[in-house]
Amino acid sequence: MRMAYVCADPGVPVFGRKGCSIHVQEVIRALQGHGVRVELFATRLDGDPPSGLETVRIHKLLALPKGELAAREQAALAANRDMHIVLEREGPFDLVYERYSLWSFAGMEYAKARGVPGLLEVNAPLIKEQAEYRGLVDFASAKRVAERVFAAATALIAVSEEIAAYLESYSTARGRVHVVSNGVNPDRFPADLKPSCPARTGTFTVGFLGTLKLWHGLPILVEAFARLHQHDPNSRLLVVGDGPERERLLADLSTHGLLEAVRLTGAVAPSQIPGLLASMDVAVAPYPQQSSFYFSPLKVYEYMAAGRAVVASRVGQLANLIEDGVNGLLCPAGDPIALAVALDQLRRAPELRARLGKAARVTVLRDHTWEVVAQYILQLAGLEPISISVS
C-alpha cells in the first residue's frame, strides 16, 4: 500500500523538535507498522530523518520566498500547481493523507480526482491563528482554500472536539468530521527509565515541557512555583523547551528570586524527552483561561505515558482526558494559587503522586497510542475495517 503524506506548512519542520514535528513523525512510524509504504511530501524538513524513518522516500516541496507577506501568500497558492504535478509524477497512491495548511488544496484534490481516499488532518483553526498571531493579508482567499480543501477530502480528522465543532461550521466539511486526539509511542517511555537530570535527594521537582509561548501559561507557572518555593526552598523547577517567551520567563524568575531554583534545558531532541520527564516528580500544563481551547496537548499525553503525576488546567480536551483525583489533578485555568495548592499537596504526598502517575500511564497506553491513531486512519480510509475507539 502506497501513501502520500503531505505537509505543505512552512511552519512545520517535519524532522524537527516541535510538537507538530513529533506528531508527523509518529503518525508515519505507526502507519509503517501496518505495512504502509509512506512517501513524504514536505515544504520544510529541518534535518535528516530520525530513527525509524530512514527508509521514507522524501519529496521536497518548493520553499516560499522571503519578503512581503502578500507575495508569500500568493506564492503559497501558486505552489498547489507544482504539488499536483509532483503527485501525478510520483503516483499512483492508494491513500493521500495531508496535514492541513493555510494555502494547500492540491493533495486532497489529487486524491479526489484519482478516486482514492484523501484524509485531511486539522490541528487548529489556521485562518484565525494566522490573522491573530502572524498576519494575514488575503483573508478571502484563505477562506476559499479552506472550503475547497474541506470539500475535496474524503474525511476530516480533528484533534479535538473543539476543532471538530470549528470544522462543522463549514458546510463543505459537515458530516465528515472525526475526532482523533494525539497519542504516544509506548516504546519511548519504558516504566523503569532512569532520570537524565536527577536532583539532590529530597528535592521536589516540578516540570514543564513545551515551546515557551504565551498561551502555555508560563507566568502562571512562575507565580505558582514561587508560592511553592516559599514552603519548600529545596523545590526545583525543570523547564524543557525554548521559544519566544524565554526572556520574559527569565525576567519573571529573576523578579521572584528563583533563578537558582530553576533548570532550563532549552530545546532538546525528542530522544532526550523521556529521561527528562523521568526527572520530574510532577508535570504541569498550566494553561490560562482562553475563549477557545482547541489543542490536543501532546506534552500531557507524554507526561502521562512517563507515569508522572499531572496537574493541568481544566480546559478543553484536558477536562475529559484527566479525571480529577484519579489519573491527575485539575485546576481552574489561569489560577496560580490553585496550582500552587495542588503542587504542595503532591509534594507532601508521594504515595498520591505514585498512584496518579500509575493511573495516568494506564490511561494513555490503553487508549491513546499512535498505534490506535494509525488503525483509525486506515479504518477511515476504508483500508482496515476494524472497530476501535480513540475519543
Image (cartoon, helix red, strand yellow):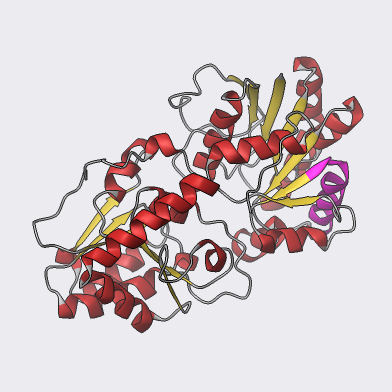
In the image, which residues are magenta?
140-155
Rendering coords of residue 30 (x, y %): 56, 31
Residue 225, by quadrant, is bottom left
* Image quadrant in which the C terminus is located: bottom right
Left or right: residue 322 compared with residue 77: left
Residue 223 in the image: x percent, y percent? 31, 78
Q: Residue at x 17, y 65 (%)?
A: 261
User: If the image is split into quadrants, where does the N terminus sit?
Assistant: top right
| Residue 14 picture quarter | top right
Q: Nearer the viewer, residue 175 or 247?
A: 175
Q: Is residue 70 left or right of residue 277?
A: right
Residue sitting at x 55%, y 39%: 370
Q: Is residue 211 visible?
A: no
Could you tell me what secondary structure mostly forms the magenta stretch?
helix
Magenta segment includes 54: no
Nearer to the camera, 133 or 41: 41
Q: Residue at x 24, y 51 (%)?
A: 279
Position above or below: 213 against 231: above
